Amino acid sequence: MIQFIDVYKIYENGTNALKNLNLTINDGDFVFVRGASGAGKSTLIKLLMHEETVSAGEVIVNGFKMSEMKHNDVPILRRTMGVVFQDFRLIPNMTVYDNVAFAMRVIGARSSEIRRRVPYILGLVGLARKARCRPSELSGGEQQRVSLARALVNNPSLIIADEPTGNVDPEMSIEIMELLDEINRRGTTIVMVTHDATLVERYDYHRVITIESGNVAQDIPGSNQ
Amino acid sequence: MIEKIRYFIKEGMRSIWVNRMMSFASVIVLCVCLIMLGTTLLASVNIGSFLTQLESKNQIMVYLDKSTKDADVARVGNTIKSMPNIKDCEFLSKDQIFSEAKKTLGEQSILMTGIDSSAFDSAYQVKIQDLSTYSQTVDALGKIDGVKYVRQDQGLASILNNIQNVVSLAGFWLFVILAVISLFIISNTIKLAMFSRKREINIMKFVGATDWFIRWPFIIEGLMIGLVSGLIALVAQYYVYTQLIVGVIKMLNIVEPINYGGFLWIILPGFLFGGIIVGTLGSAVSVRKYLKV
């Protein structure tokens, strides 16, 4: 579960990014987060990942109270979630297999477990045959699927997707959405930031939260929630 | 745990290979710095040894009265030997001094016709340890009962003493300045190498890697680069010194060059530990900046 309670975020340069934001996302939800540039979407994502801390209020993610977290707790929080970025953020000098396996090595998974799990996840995103390729040899859509595989490999309870379809063609966007939809059906919470109105309309059975000037302007519950 | 250690080593090695241009640059910079420091040290020790060899030629002759009896000769010898700052004291009889004088004159020894050894004074040939107290030692020698006069070359002694002071001071400061410059260049090279991998570290943080999990491969990488640099610098300096410098010193034919083998006990650990410490610390400190995500 994710909770934003009376959250304010003011950056050092004086930018007031979030103003008294209150929001609850339940386990298993699929939520689209929309809003114009500068509305506060990125700050919301950064707070979820503990990349930034609140100026006032409280954020609770998967049982972690952000205001009480110590530096050593941050990696443990991040292991409960998978993150997909618009720019994929793959390690360029590692193969597809190693990029995905890396997320498992980080949490101390055994080699035998890695050898069993990574091919399975790569199969799930349709990239089993590209395991030995480097990211630069893949298309944008394929790179995003690797990023998704890496986010999924540790079986997180939450996936944060920051504009995952922003750098891929419309056809591939649908494929990625289908994958996220399937992952959500298996019980994983998905928080997806997007600008793509067509995509939101197409999957209108999910909850849509619109952020404006650092606050929730609109919260449309999904038909399946 | 063993699996983790194996992973860190493998990752460290892989990083060296994947970022081979940066690794190569780091090795070169570290090598050059180590060689510069080692050469300064070698040069200053060689000059020191050169001065010591010159010093050993700086002798004081303590001449005895002709009337001095054998028992007194021995007493004077014992008094000299018991004095502080005396390195060596050798008795030269009248005959020895006479034949030495003839040898020095060579063909002109004909001038000594009609003169025998009785015209000469017997003497003690004295070498002293510390040139800075040269004049006090000479004064003390002159005051010994039975000593007629002391022949000495204080000019050379003071020149040698001054040179030695300048060399050791200049050597020390040159070493310090080079060490600071080396550290500056090395830390910048490592920072540059680290900057190119900022994104990689950032990704590691987002998938939940702990700081130490990220740091260890970098430390191993720095350690390996340091070790390799130390070894290359050692071999390079050995060849340059033994093949080039020793040749030049021998050609000048003034003094004997110092044997590199006798130096190995300073140079070997100095280069290896110097390389390893700079490489490891440089990596560990530089990576810290990018861990704050």
Image (cartoon, rainbow, N blue to C red):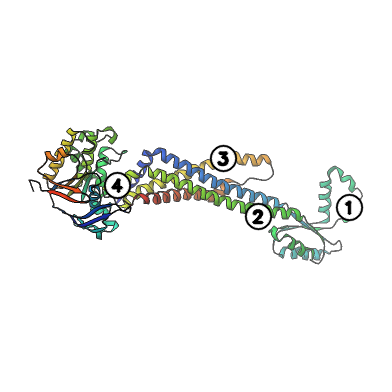
Total marks placed? 4
Can residue A134 be seen here?
Answer: no
- Chain for mark 3? B
Q: Secondary structure at mark 4?
A: helix
Question: Which disc number belongs to residue B116?
Answer: 1
| Picture coordinates of residue A223, whole percent (x, y) | 7, 45
The 10 Å Cα crowd at callout 2, few under 14, some 14 to 19, many 20 or more, is few
* 4 vs 3, front mark: 4
Q: Residue B157: which numbered mark, if any? A: none
Indicate the amino acid at tag 3: Val
Nearest the viewer among B3 and A57 is: A57
Q: Which residue is mark 4?
A: B204
| Residue count near mark 3 (Cα–Cα under 10 Å), binned few <14, some 14–19, many ≥20 | few
State how far apart marks 3 and 2 are (Cα): 27 Å
Q: Amino acid at mark 4?
A: Met
- Residue B226 in the image: state x and y as whole percent: 44, 46
The residue under label 2 is: B165
First of labels 4, 2 by sequence position: 2
Determine the image quadrant of residue A192.
top left
Instruction: Name the residue: 18% across, 34% down.
Output: A170
Mark 4 and mark 2 on one chain? yes
Labels 1 and 4 within one chain: yes
Q: Amino acid at mark 2?
A: Asn
Residue drawn 19% across and 48% down?
A211
Q: Amino acid at mark 1?
A: Asp
The foreground one among B95 and A12 is A12
Q: Where residue A116 sits in the image (x, y, percent)?
A: 20, 42
- The reply to the same-chain question for discs 1 and 2 is yes
